[in-house]
DNA sequence: TCAAACTGAGTTAGCGCTAACGTAACCAGC
DNA sequence: GCTGGTTACGTTAGCGCTAACTCAGTTTGA
């Protein structure tokens, strides 16, 4: 392994003090242009790269942030992560990736580890922490961006980014009604999920709007996976064979539901119309292509990263972004 | 933001030297059991957590590694990343995630940034670096694990993990022949991809084995995406409508090809049998379910991380793992 | 009984870098 | 000619931690 070139090496070679070299590489004033150039040339020649850890120790800034997601394998979070990473790369930040496996304890442990690293901030997706636990985290980290989660109290170092789930659900209901479907089912995600609750609210509001009474028999909860969608749809179709529209918690669930419908001999969209949420790549791979509420996931990631940088640099904070999804009408509804 | 508790704070509170506290928390010998316990209690009480950056500076070890992938959104890499992260978490390592976007220049930049962080090692997936560039990286980083890429020269701090592409391809061919299919096409990935070349070799070997002459008209190259699969399959089916089996570079390509076959009025698997590689989640979501060479992707990730730790701790190095995929026969062949 | 060997600490130095202050040289202005 | 303000650097100290050395007191063994 090659020994690292350090500031001291450059200083010695240039016959100046370390501070002068530091000023040169950080583009700070206080030295003549030709000396600066001479140093920069030397830096280039000797292949010097500042040690970010050492710099972090001295400045208390690490240009490193944490990204905490339930599962980077889930296309939803994979897309967000991609956006975060892209924006981070552009701004010369690095990201620590951690999976929580939807487990609050592991999430806590992950945040603990990240905090030890002295990172500048965290992007926390779909946090399962309690309100109090989250308050604590907001206090200890310099900057936090919450994706898919809200916090009652505002904080100067906190920004939240949420999809407008309620409006989203209402839009889906409206489309079903435009299609003259009245037996509309909702296959929701985990009951304790915040976005699930908000979507359910939107679903109910949409029904009220159309003066259709809410029928608990048309609502199922399940895991946010294809398999979950299959199970819930099977239960649902057995209980209510008259269902002619399904609003699914997300695209994975929608795809599972779609398959079960077909296996039950129902045509999609003729007999049962199906709409999902997220617009993951699978939505256009599957046949019939899935009508879904498109959420600009990588954009959310980019936005999250930029928001985080804004807090860190003191240009932002205490904001709450609402992302408005858009209905992408394809073949399933 | 709460001020961090430091070693010095604990030392003062316990009325001992910092070194004693350091020994206590690092479980090193040289102090009495009750003093150690007293310090540990204090650490707990005051909520002290060592600053890993500072520790890294002092020990030249950061318990942090880099994970470089072309695109974390691609299920193939997402799965590997998941395995890496899991194993890292278990061993108290943290990972920096970087996407290269299949771009050699961005890959180089990413490695540069990672190197600045003074990380302990890198896991490099599907590297696009030239042989020389890679040699250079192997020299500068303390430890490297190469996934999906080989290097001619062995190095003490290098471990490679590769799927046995050649054997894999031969197994696919054999299955097609068992099914009595003779017009076997290969839709390959990017021409400069190493695994593509090896799979093509295996394809040819399989043909030779069955005494079927190699026909370049049955081979297409494309991007490793569903869209790529669609395009290549369309070209192929127009050129050779007699094709009755397709070996696809990966599952994404296979799915694209499958759809185009169906759109051409060919039934899968009756008219055209299709086999992919990787066994990503999509393979079981799609209908008909995809027959594919199953690769234990998260296991590769775990293996990679453990191998890296072995190099770092000096227990390994200079190894080359071959992963043997297994044919998962489902509905498409 | 006394030197050698161990125990349980403390002290010093330094990882690579930067903030904050110090200082010599130069220049303008009255 | 001297004050006061720049300019262009150097010096000092310290971020939080640990490796390596030091040292006083205790134990061991012949």
Image: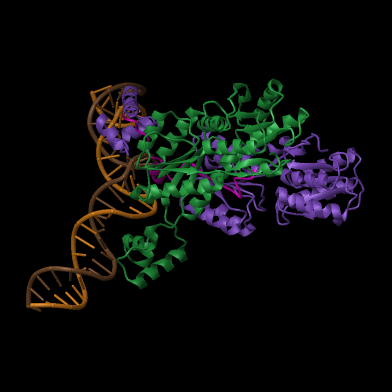
Chain colours: A green, B purple, C orange, D brown
A135 horizontally vs B67: left or right: left
| Displayed quadrant of residue A50 | bottom left
Q: Is residue A255 magenta?
A: no
- Looking at the image, residue A251 sits to the left or right of residue A128; the answer is right
Q: Looking at the picture, how far across and down is residue B107, in whole percent?
A: 57, 55
Q: Position of residue A149 (x, y in %)?
A: 47, 35
Q: Residue at x 58, y 25 (%)?
A: A213
Residue A136 in the image: state x and y as whole percent.
37, 32
Q: Quadrant of residue A281?
A: top right
Whether residue A152 sits left or right of residue B286 in the image: it is left
Is A70 or B201 nearer to us in this picture? A70
Number of marks drawn: 0
Q: Position of residue B155 (x, y in %)?
A: 61, 49
Between A156 and C28, the one lying in front of the other is A156
Q: Quadrant of the C terminus of chain A?
A: top right
The boundaries of the magenta stretch are: B46-74
- Asked whether the viewer can see residue B325, the reply is no
Q: Residue at x 58, y 42 (%)?
A: A78
Is B56 a magenta residue?
yes
Residue A317 appears in the figure = yes
**Direction from residue B314 to residue B323 in the image, left or right:** right
Q: Residue furthest front?
A: A211
Who is closer to the viewer here, B24 or A185?
A185
User: As rendered, which of A67 and B121 lies closer to the eye?
Assistant: A67
Q: Quadrant of residue A229?
A: top right
């Amino acid at each position: 392994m090659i020994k690292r070139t350090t500031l001291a090496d450059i200083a010695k070679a240039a016959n100046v003090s370390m501070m002068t070299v530091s000023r040169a590489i950080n583009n700070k004033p206080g030295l003549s242009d030709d000396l600066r150039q001479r140093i920069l040339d030397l830096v280039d020649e000797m292949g010097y790269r500042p040690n970010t850890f050492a710099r972090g120790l001295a400045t208390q800034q690490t240009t490193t942030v944490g990204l905490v997601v339930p599962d980077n394998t889930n296309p939803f979070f994979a897309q967000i992560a991609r956006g975060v990473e892209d924006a981070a790369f552009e701004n010369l930040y690095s990201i620590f990736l951690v999976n929580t496996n939807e487990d609050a304890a592991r999430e806590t442990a992950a945040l603990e580890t990240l905090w030890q690293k002295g990172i500048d901030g965290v992007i926390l997706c779909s946090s399962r922490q309690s309100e109090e636990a989250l308050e604590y985290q907001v206090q200890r980290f310099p900057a936090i961006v919450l994706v898919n989660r809200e916090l009652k109290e505002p904080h100067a170092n906190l920004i939240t980014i949420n999809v407008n789930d309620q409006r989203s659900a209402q839009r889906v209901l409206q489309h079903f009604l435009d299609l003259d479907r009245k037996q509309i089912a909702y296959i929701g995600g985990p009951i304790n999920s915040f976005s699930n609750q908000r979507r359910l609210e939107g679903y109910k509001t949409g029904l009220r709007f159309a003066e259709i009474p809410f029928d608990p028999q048309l609502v199922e909860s399940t895991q946010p996976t294809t398999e979950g969608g299959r199970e819930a749809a099977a239960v649902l179709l057995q209980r209510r064979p008259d269902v002619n529209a399904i609003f699914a918690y997300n695209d994975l669930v929608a795809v599972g539901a779609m398959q079960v419908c077909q296996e039950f001999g129902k045509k999609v969209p003729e007999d049962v119309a199906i709409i999902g949420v997220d617009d993951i790549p699978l939505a256009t791979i599957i046949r019939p292509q899935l009508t879904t509420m498109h959420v600009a996931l990588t954009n959310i990631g980019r936005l999250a990263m930029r928001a985080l940088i804004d807090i860190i640099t003191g240009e932002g904070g205490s904001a709450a972004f609402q992302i408005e999804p858009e209905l992408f009408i394809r073949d399933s509804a």
